[in-house]
Amino acid sequence: MASGSETSSLETTFYNKYTEFIADLQGAFPELKEGLDTAAALPAAMAVTQYAKHVLPKHIGFTGALRCPGAVLPGVVITEELWGAVSDKTKRAVHDYMSILDLSAMYSSGGSTIPRNGRRIS
């Protein structure tokens, strides 16, 4: 389990990337404005918790393929239609952000959100 200062640092790293991701998604997917605004309003601790609970389990195990991730942030879902309309560069950027957020969320929880066989480890 991460110590209090490690958790705070990991939470800060997560939230910095989270807000950066929101800004980039606003440019690439203006159709998602309402959900992105709601995700942006979450305090750091809640953003990490909600991401780990609602987003992380839905895309663990993605391969290198640029598949549509669906849920990318709490309350924000990229549809197949939207995904098909963006460049491979944008798709790679989305996957790269999510990889960073995944790791930060898992480590900030002390590993309790790492899914194994579709189930959380406690």
Image (cartoon, rainbow, N blue to C red):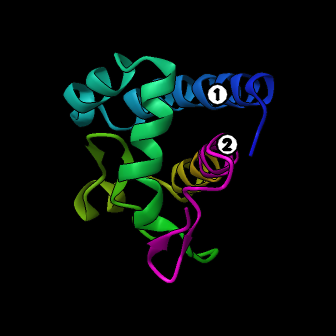
Residue beneath disc 1: 11
Whether pointer 1 and pointer 2 mark residues with C-beta atoms closer than 8 Å, the reply is yes
Left or right: residue 47 compared with residue 62: left
Q: Position of residue 46 (x, y in %)?
A: 42, 27
**N-terminal of the two: label 1 or label 2?**
1
Left or right: residue 36 compared with residue 105: left
* Residue 106 position (above or below residue 62): above
Q: Position of residue 4 (x, y in %)?
A: 74, 25
Residues in magenta?
100-122
Q: Which mark is residue 74?
A: none
Q: Residue at x 29, y 20 (%)?
A: 37
Considering the numbered disc 1 on the image, is that residue within a helix, a strand or a loop? helix
Q: Nearer the viewer, residue 51 or 82?
A: 51
Left or right: residue 76 compared with residue 40: left
Left or right: residue 15 compared with residue 71: right
Q: Residue at x 67, y 46 (%)?
A: 100
Considering the numbered disc 2 on the image, is that residue within a helix, a strand or a loop? helix
Q: Residues within 10 Å of mark 1 (few under 14, many from 20)?
A: many
Q: The residue under label 1 is which amino acid type?
A: Glu
Residue 52 on the magenta segment: no
Q: Position of residue 89 (x, y in %)?
A: 59, 52
Q: The residue under label 2 is which amino acid type?
A: Ser
Residue beneath disc 2: 104
